[in-house]
Image (spheres, rainbow, N blue to C red):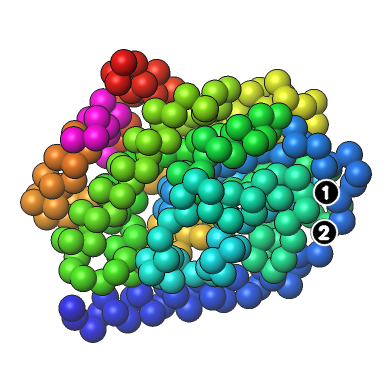
Amino acid sequence: MTAEPERQKFVWRVRYARKYLRRRLDHIVVEAPAAHPLENALWICSWQRSGSTWLAEMLAHQRGTRLVYEPANVPDGLVSGDASADIPLPREGDPATFAVVRALRGVERGDWVDQMAGTHFARRRVVKDVRAMALAPSIRTKCPETPVVILTRHPIAVARSKVDLGWTSGASRSDDFATEVQQWCEIHAAALRDTRLANVHFVTYEALRENPQARVAAIRDYALGFSSTWRGLSTDTLDPTRPSATNFRSTTVGAADGWGDLDDALIHRAVEIMRDYGFDGLYDDQPGARSELDSFVHHFRASVH
């Protein structure tokens, strides 16, 4: 590997650490008693590099909303993306399950989860996780009163971003890329086919990017079915062009995904993996999503019966 990619990865890691330390300075939060019911929390369950921080920031921009950052990382002590490559994703029954539930109840506190709290007096919570997709069905069962948003992004885009950032094992670019796509497909297939994920709002990053205001409004309307506390979430004051706190690669917000720098062999290998798991109805060899995620999930579940 040449020196330039290594230097770029170092720059991204320094940028990550600087933003993390800066956010830690403003994490003191007091929650109103009314904030603790589970229906006053909203959980975003996604994957690394899928736009979950961007979505969480938009949903938490309402005054009095506490953003709880990745509680599933707490039991493993994860505070950086590159370290996550060495620690297996939590599976059902893992202590991370209970960390998420505590966050949804408003009792999980600490420098990591409150680094982006965004308010000093909270009446509701937006909780986001990127390593808890395998836990989603059991968490849904434990917290049926909580609105849940499942957010996906094209696995080729996700794998490309993680490999470029060095958040992989480092075996080789091609093997790391294929491993990321394989793991994405395996865990998403199990989660999306699980009927315990009932009354969940499904959305792709690609759809969110195309029309952020409309998609955030749809999430708000969904959350209103659980609690009136989400009524004040206005889309008029959203600024979707504002880069998220985890935009380490300094990409343009709203810019279309592209992977022209990837070898055709890598793309072909990824498409074969997606096809093996049945995701060719949602994603293919081109950027973008082929269908709405909720529609895809309906047919995806029906295909196993």
Q: Does residue 121 appear to the left or right of 282 in the view shown?
A: right
Task: Kindly identify the amino acid type of the residue bearing the numbered disc 2.
Answer: Val
Q: Earlier in the sequence, mark 2 or mark 1?
A: 2
Rendering coords of residue 138 (x, y %): 55, 38
Residue located at (52% from left, 28% from top): 197
Quarter of the figure with residue 73: bottom right
Residue at the extreme front of the image, as rendered: 93
Closer-to-camera residue (293/73): 73
> What residue is disc 2 on?
29
Residue at the extreme right of the image, as rendered: 33
Residue at the extreme left of the image, as rendered: 265
Residue 262 seen anywhere in this rendered image of the structure = yes
Rendering coords of residue 112 (x, y %): 64, 66
Residue contact at pointers 2 and 1, CB within 8 angstroms: yes
Rendering coords of residue 302 (x, y %): 34, 16
Residue located at (69% from left, 68% from top): 111
Circle 1 Cα neighbour tier, 10 Å, few/some/many (<14 / 14–19 / ≥20): many
Quarter of the figure with residue 207: top left
Residue located at (47% from left, 38% from top): 151
Closer-to-camera residue (220/44): 44
Is most of the magenta stretch helix, strand or loop?
loop
Circle on res. 122: 1
Q: Does residue 269 appear to the left or right of 217 in the view shown?
A: left
Q: Quarter of the image containing the N terminus?
A: bottom left
Rendering coords of residue 177 (x, y %): 23, 57
Q: Does residue 3 appear to the left or right of 13 in the view shown?
A: left
Task: Kindly identify the amino acid type of the residue bearing the numbered disc 1.
Answer: Ala
Quarter of the figure with residue 176: bottom left
Q: Give the magenta-colored segment's residue range.
A: 276-287
Give the SS element for disc 2. Answer: loop
